[in-house]
Amino acid sequence: MTDEFLAAGVDFERANAARVYDYILGGSHNFAVDREQASRTMAAYPDIARSAQANRAFLGAAVRWCLREGIDQFLDLGSGVPTVGNVHEIAPRARVAYVDFEPVAVAHAQEITADLPQVSVTRADLRDPDSVLEAPGVAGLLDLSRPVGVLMVAVLHFVPDDAAAVVARYREALTPGSAIAISHNSDDQDDPAVGAAIAGVAEAMRGSATELTLRSRNEIAALVAGLDLVPPGLVDVARWPDDDAAPVGVYGLLARN
Ligand SMILES: C[S@@+](CC[C@H](N)C(=O)[O-])C[C@H]1O[C@@H](n2cnc3c(N)ncnc32)[C@H](O)[C@@H]1O
């Protein structure tokens, strides 16, 4: 596999969020450089495993909400290395288009979904929405004339530039009744200790292939301006939809298009 990853452009010298996150969640699709990065990140934020678990739980809750509303197709942008609670497992009858730009994440997702015709895996950069939407794995699988659940979970904080413009382009492509789930790290927290921990994570990730861009609560809300937020609105993922767990420093929201 190493040769294939080299050919696919994996940089074994620089940690990547897909593999660091996999390690933090207890997975095995990561390299030494990722584990070293994870150690630095955990030193900055000892509660980061709970944060990753709460984020995965948010993703699952958002998908189940969509299913209850009759949404049966999903575009999972920045889908990551498959772990527990993948979208196609929560929604086994749905069409699911996974998109990620990291070769290890894509290879593993392709491997575990190879026998599932209702699931596709595309290697693409979500910052180029037109290429994503035109990719065979997306255009050939999803019917954009019907509602889609678009998942941008723990990924937009890896988009340094105009994340709002990126989200806006996906919004334009969606038919009414679609839904957009977003989770996003932020140091804009009521609890200064949580804010400082998230700022520490961003500092620890500096120099990695996937540096963190933190946004304020208002900047995250602005990504879906004009859309109706599903209750409870924009809250910490550990509290979405109705938990009272301590915040983990990641905001989550689900918006109806
Ligand atoms: C922290 S993981 C989140 C995985 C999953 N969405 C979740 O929340 O459990 C972030 C993922 O986003 C991917 N990613 C980051 N920037 C991306 C981009 N511009 N295009 C596609 N994928 C991207 C990374 O490769 C990584 O797999």
Image: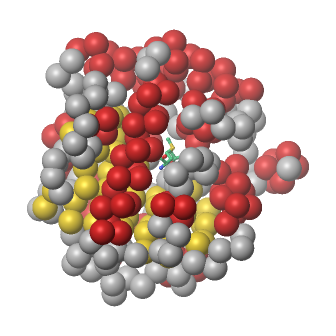
The image quadrant where one finds the C terminus is bottom left
Between 70 and 206, the one lying in front of the other is 70
Residue at image location 21% in from the left, 18% down from the top: 191
User: x, y (%) of residue 62?
Assistant: 33, 56
- Where is 29 relative to 89, above or below? above
Q: How many marks?
A: 0
Q: Relative to 37, is 153 on the left or the right?
A: left
- Where is 241 relative to 65, above or below? above
User: x, y (%) of residue 255?
Assistant: 22, 59
Between 168 and 115, the one lying in front of the other is 115
Residue 161 visible in rendering:
no
Q: How is the image coloured?
A: secondary structure
Q: Relative to 108, is 39 on the left or the right?
A: left
Quadrant of residue 2 in the image? top right
Q: Relative to 18, is 176 on the left or the right?
A: left
- Where is 211 relative to 166, above or below? above
Quadrant of residue 64 in the image? bottom left
User: x, y (%) of residue 74?
Assistant: 43, 69
